[in-house]
Image (cartoon, helix red, strand yellow):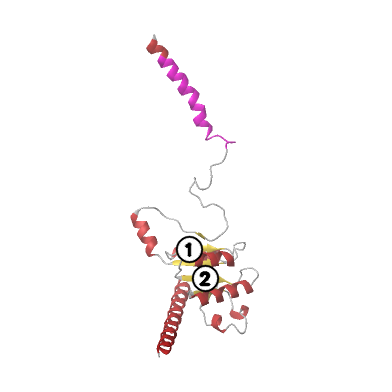
Amino acid sequence: MNSRRSGQQAMWVEERALPERRGHDEPGDAPISASLRGQPMDRPGPHSVRGGSRDAAHLDAAISAPRVLLAHNATAVTCDALARLIEATGAELVDASSSDDARLAVEAEDFDACLVCLDLPPAPFAGVRLASELLERGCPVVLVTRSQRWLPADATALRALPWIPPDATEDALREALDTASGIQDSVVRRRTSLETSRVRLVRR
C-alpha cells in the first residue's frame, strides 16, 4: 500500500509540473531576452557585426582576420552592400552608425582600415571631420563616396586618400584598403624620421 501510494503521489507531482514546463513555450509568456537567444542586443555604440563559433579554428581565424571599421549613416541603406562585401572578404566588420561611435571604437582598439562614408549626418561635414581626425590619429582611412566633389577644396590630405563608391567591387575594395595601408605606413615612417631628427637636435 505504501509503495502504491508513493507511486500515485509521484505521478501527481509530475502531472502538476508538466503544464509549468509547457507554459514556457505558449504564447503570452515574457519574451526571452535577446542576449539569451544569442542575438545582438539593440544598443548604442559600435558593435561587431560578424560573429563566429567558439572553437579553436574559428578563434584562430578571427584573430588573424583584418578588423575593418565602417562609419556610415545607419538609417540609410547606402552602405548595406559594402558591409556585406567587407564580411565576404573574411574581415571582421565593426559597424559605427555615427561619428561618436567611430571615435569610441578607435579609442578602444586598433583597426587595419577605417572606412568613412560621407553620408554621416550632417553630410558631408561629419564624414569629412571624422576622416580628418582618424587620419591624424594614424588610422588607414578609405572614403566611401561617389565623388570627391563633396570634399572641401582645401582638404588636400583627404583628396589624397583612396575612395570607393558604396557599390564597389571586391577588387576595388581590396585595392583601396592596400592603398590606405601604404599611405599610412609612409606617414608613420615620416613621423618617426622627424621625431628621430628632433631627438638628435636636442642632444646636440
Residue 132 versus residue 91 in the image, above or below: below
Residue for badge 2: 115
Dot 2, crowdedness within 10 Å: few (<14), some or many (≥20)?
many
The magenta-colored residue range is 6-29
**Rendered residue at 55%/74% (across/down):** 133
The answer to which quarter of the image holds residue 7 is: top left
Locate residue 88, reporting x and y percent.
45, 63
Amino acid type at image mark 1: Leu
Q: Quadrant of the C terminus?
A: bottom left
Locate residue 97, reporting x and y percent.
58, 63
* SS at circle 1: strand
The answer to whether any part of residue 7 appears in the image is yes
Q: Quadrant of the N terminus?
A: top left
Mark 2 or 1 closer to N-term?
Answer: 1
Locate residue 39, reporting x and y percent.
50, 50
**Rendered residue at 58%/67% (across/down):** 99
Residue for badge 1: 93
Looking at this rendering, what residue extends furthest in the right direction? 122
Amino acid type at image mark 2: Leu
The answer to which quarter of the image holds residue 43 is: bottom right
Residue closest to the eye, 157 or 82: 157
Locate residue 28, reporting x and y percent.
59, 36
Residue closest to the eye, 192 or 71: 192
